[in-house]
Image (cartoon, coloured by chain):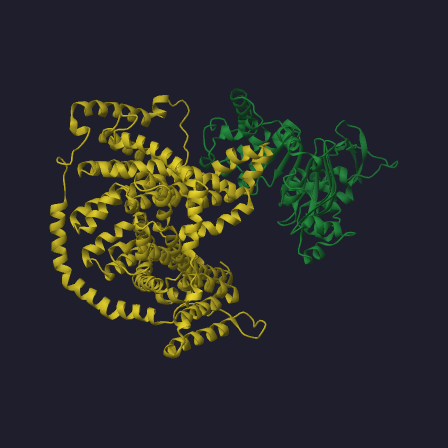
Chain colours: A yellow, B green
Amino acid sequence: MSIAITDTPPVGGGLTRIRMAQILLIVALGLIVAKTVLPAGLIRPPEWLVWPFADWINAAFRFMRDDLGLIHVTRAIADGIEWLLDVTANLLYGKSRWPNIGPIPWTVIASSAAIIGYALNGWRLALLSGGTFCWIAIMGQWTWSMETLSVIVVAAPFSILMGLLMGIAAWRSALFEKLLNPVLNIAQSMPHFAYMIPVVVFIGVGPKAGAVVTIIFSVPPMIRMTLLGLKKVSDEVIESGKMSGATQLQLLWSVRIPTARTDILVGVNQVIMQCLAMVVLASFIGMPGLGQKLLQLLQALKVGRSVEIGITIVLLAVMLDRCSKAWAMRQPQHHDKGTPWFVRHRLALIWAVLTLVLLGLAQVVPLFDQISRRQALSLAGPLDAVVDWFIVVVDPVTTWLRWFLIVWVLIPLRDAFLFAPFSAVLMLIAAAGWAIGGLRSAAICVAFFGFIAMSGWWDRAMITVYTVTVSVAIATVIGFPLGIWASRNQARAQRMLLVCDTFQTFPSFIYLIPVVMLFGVNDVAVVGAVVLFAAVPLIRYTIEGLRGVPHEMVEAAEMSGATYGQTMWKVRLPLALPTIMVGVNQSVMFSLFMVIIAAFIGTQDLGQEMQRALSSSDVGKGLVLGTAVAFMGLLVDHLVQTWGARRRALLGL
Amino acid sequence: MSAPEPVISCKSVWKLFGPNADHYFSTLKGAPSFQSIREAGYIAAVRDVTLDIPRGEMLVIMGLSGSGKSTLVRCLSRLIDITGGEVHVDGQDIGALKEKELIELRRNKMGMVFQSFGLLPHRTVLDNIAFPLEMRGQDRHTRRARAMEVIELVGLSGREDYFPRELSGGQQQRVGIARSLAIEPDIWFLDEPFSALDPLIRREMQDEFLRLQRLLGKTIVFITHDFDEALRLADRIAIMKDGAVEQCDRPDRIVMNPATKYVAKFTHEIDKARVVRASALMQPVNGAALTGDAVGSQQTIHDLARLIINDPREAFPVAGDDGALLGMLPRQEAIDVLLGGHA
């Protein structure tokens, strides 16, 4: 599939990169074969190698919390946030707090959402936004949804502001950027739960903790996008600003930030989506709302009701994503000269009138104000029936699949992963590192995985590695051919990318619904959820990679008489491979996130320990586990990036 | 041109790019070549350039891409700090200016037009043009009034509420030109202003530009990679190669007497008759007997072609704009130019 990568010329001792990797590989295999005669210290990390990181972290946290009195600061901040949360909670679902004017009638919120949708991108978005709120109201999920939304409404602006400021700081100071970069790398590959434990320690549980964890979790992409946007502003635009006599500050606020608008707003979009994903998961630390409801229903295996909630979450996700993206992509448009003011502000006027009318109606007709649970529709009955019927129909298949996967794939593989001595695993990783990036990469990779050995969670970590490996392998088998199929023509590729886009907006929690429905609560369900989640970026990047191959090259191949298959294998795939590998990279990251989340339906890996750390508020353990997961992701990331960079340089892309 | 005080004057200006370029520059002795500097790991974007630009002159800096012409113009406006030498604007050493003074200079004396326009995408035509005025803190009303004036000047009336993306390339560059003129600068830098436009629009914009220049009479530094454009517009042309100025002279003198082989390559394909004016071939009268009507010293040989072919005189008297006799134009030399004879 790929052209053999040319070896770098022999260095130093006369060993090529590949030869060195081969030697390491043979050593690793030797260690596995000779396991029975190995000393125990080579099979599992010996005790002197396992350092008490968790205790150190806990000591540091205790010091910060109690001795430095940081807890008073965090509590004060949390109280401020709680006050804001109470205001939004009062407005959105009538919690009896200041300003005591809520709840706003659902019709007003739905119509406002529709008009915002229309203003951003026309009728279809208006229908989606308005329709989402109508669905929520009619299905009787108003309070839960508003509990969720009220946190997003408070958390997102905080994240955006913090991200913007830190992005600007990183852009101004190269040193700050250098320090921030590894922190962001780790932060973005830490599983959600790792964030929750310190928040529980410092803030407690409930909505305010949910809001704080949401803010912390969603800041990194905003920093990244702000920095990217500011760096991307073209030199000429900045020079034109300078030649216009702008001072440094004027340049920043009047030239750079407005010109970087699109990138910054893409950051806003990511913040909002991260907020939604986190707020749903924050149910684990007592955040009420849709997430909590879904968690309870899933645990009680009430499939119909959980599908209803799932649909709500999906609708909210798609709506928030489409609206914020439309805002980012929106280009300013001028009005013709002499347009009267009521035409210029047509939508604002319609909104004002509609809101007044609906507010009045709500006073008269209670149904326009609120729909109580008893008046609400529910699809749970028919949904359950359909699901039951479906499960009965596919049961032979799923039962067989479950049996086959567990007995013939999952258990043997898990045993194999657990069988391997840790020294052999480290050697294998060193070999991979050396093959791809020489000594430096090998050292980085061993350092990442060495930490996992030293953390004392080797067996758990290996189960996580095994789940991710199996899932990504299955995801590749499904996603890769699907991507190739979809990239055959433009229209199909676009449809498929739209589907992928939509799937990617779903909070990870959602993916558990169908697999629990089909497979129940076991390993197969976990792998199923991870595969679903991980296949999306693979399909996406396969399509983008293949569609991104320059036309001239494809045309040149066709004029050389290549068949479709020859063009695909000899021209398009090799050129698309660097992009496809980005997909694999993301797929691994997503899998790691999902594996940890899936812990609550029963796994024995790091995720389960993470859950335990969460329930006992053990910050040290939580962070060690989180870092271990992050390092797995960063290891793959490092390998793929190094390989991709070299490959691109080789292809001159 | 009787040497009035130059508006811009640069003395052996150097600009090197590379790590720690200032230090490296201080170790240089004599006149190192572009190649030797490159071997040391530096790029000599501007090499020992000395130029004086008198008030009201249009100097065109011509060179291929990578010749350092864009860097040079950025040194003159101090968008880039120079590595060695001095640049004086109106007698002030701009390298010594503090940031505040530099901003003042740009707010009051300089305007610049960019190749890809450098417009702010989120501002309307009017707000883009008023931007420099906004920067210096003028109030909304005066800003608007002045911006409308320049909009009219560049022929964009009626488009003031458009956004840049709603305009064609030519119109966008009109906005760029209008913005650079909003503060009524004395010095006008144009960095390949028409290169991004297609040929027909380019021609139209050049005419427009000449009209503006006749109207405003500013000191202009105009960058281009197009020799024809340079010949059309320039009072003087400076031809650059590898960061150094190969020749700086009037267009017809460059065409008639290219200083180096490199310059000759550009002039080779040029129809000299369209560039060379009578004054360039003019010789002193030295008591020769001249008869008949005089030709204008600013007329090109191409303008005079019919006369030169049909009139049997050996030499034609040449007169200045005021009718005074300046010298004589030998017929044979004019015919040589016309037929593309000797260089």
Q: Residue A35: x and y, percent?
A: 37, 76
Instruction: Name the foreground residue: B43 vs B238.
Output: B43
Left/right of residue A295 with respect to residue B249 in the rendered view: left
Residue at image position (51%, 33%) is A254
Residue at image position (46%, 50%) is A183
**How many numbered circles are shown?**
0
Q: Residue A432: x and y, percent?
A: 44, 68
Within the image, what quadrant is residue B101 found in? top right
Q: Can residue A492 be seen in this view?
A: no
Q: In this view, does B171 lie above or below A300?
A: above
Within the image, what quadrant is residue B219 found in? top right
Left/right of residue B92 with respect to residue A157 in the rendered view: right
Q: Residue B109: x and y, percent?
A: 65, 29
Residue at the limit of the structure toward the front, as seen here = A67
Residue at the limit of the structure toward the top, as seen here = B141
Q: Residue A198: x and y, percent?
A: 38, 47
Left/right of residue A17 with respect to residue A321 in the rendered view: right
Residue at image position (50%, 63%) is A650
- For the N terminus of chain A, give its image quadrant: bottom left
